[in-house]
Amino acid sequence: MPLPATSVATRVPGWKRIALADDVLTVPDELRLDLGATAKALTADRAAKRVADVLGTGVLVSLGGDIATAGIAPEGGWQVLVEDLPGDPSQQVTLSAGSGLATSSTQKRRWMRGGKPMHHILDPRFGTPVGAIWKTVTVAADSCSRANALSTAAMVRGLAAVEWLAGDGVAARLVDRFDRITVTPAWPTPETVTVGAGLGAGLGAGLAGTTGEAARG
């Protein structure tokens, strides 16, 4: 008597099954795209630009910590406190007009599955949460969308992220699970007075370390 047929489920990372040709995106029926992070950052960029264009004023938009600025910055620049959770290592920075800031974190959107802790940032190679290398990665760039993409990609790259970010001149601050802080050369130290006049190819200009009070970012 033949044995009943059995099937073995194999997990194929979804991104390899998504196709983009010109402006047509093809997604298999059984897959779903979560554009929450990207959409949030893009919305912050568009909202800031819209307000600045319509009202002719400087504006900072923060959507869940994804920050975009547009128009003329206030005297001294936009003051932002970089801190994921209360008690985490923090640093206040000054954002120049037209720049963005985003933090990717493995400390939020967490749950347990099979007795193992899970979080929402996935390694596209395996479809599983990225390893516990960094608690947070914060990036400053010329837009919130770019900052968000770079910070998330850094999470996936793990230890290799530091050299990758630094090689592209990206201003980034990475905090590991032991609260040790690693920064790229473009990121300001607490003693930094200024880092250039605007966010350009290096992405770190226009960001300065400061002291004082600021909104939580």
Image (cartoon, rainbow, N blue to C red):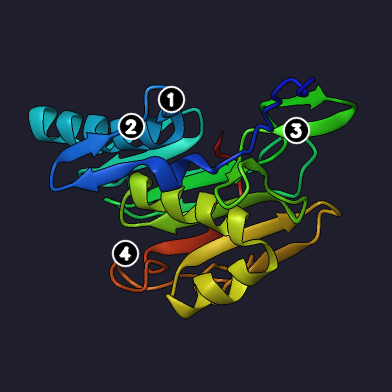
Type of amino acid under label 4? Leu
Disc 2: which residue? 27
Pinpoint residue 210: horizontal percent, then vertical percent.
56, 57
Q: Secondary structure at mark 4?
A: loop
Q: Secondary structure at mark 1?
A: loop
Residue 81 placement, left or right of 17: right
**Marks 3 and 1: which is nearer the front?**
1
Residue 3 drawn above or below residue 18:
above
Disc 1: which residue? 32
Disc 4: which residue? 199
Q: Identify the image quadrant of the C terminus.
A: top right
Number of the label disc, if any, that sits on residue 195? none
**Marks 4 and 3: which is nearer the front?**
3
Which numbered disc flags the more N-terminal residue, 2 or 1?
2
Type of amino acid under label 3? Met
Please say if the residues under marks 4 and 3 sit with CB atoms less than 8 Å apart: no
Which numbered disc flags the more N-terminal residue, 4 or 3?
3
Which numbered disc flags the more N-terminal residue, 3 or 1?
1
Disc 3: which residue? 118
The reply to whether residue 91 is in sight is: no
- CA gap between label 4 and label 3 equals 35 Å
Residue drawn at point x = 66 percent, y = 39 percent: 84
- CA gap between label 4 and label 1 equals 34 Å
Camera-nearest residue between 68 and 81: 68
Type of amino acid under label 1? Arg
Residue 157 placement, left or right of 195: right
Please say if the residues under marks 4 and 2 sit with CB atoms less than 8 Å apart: no
**Marks 4 and 2: which is nearer the front?**
2
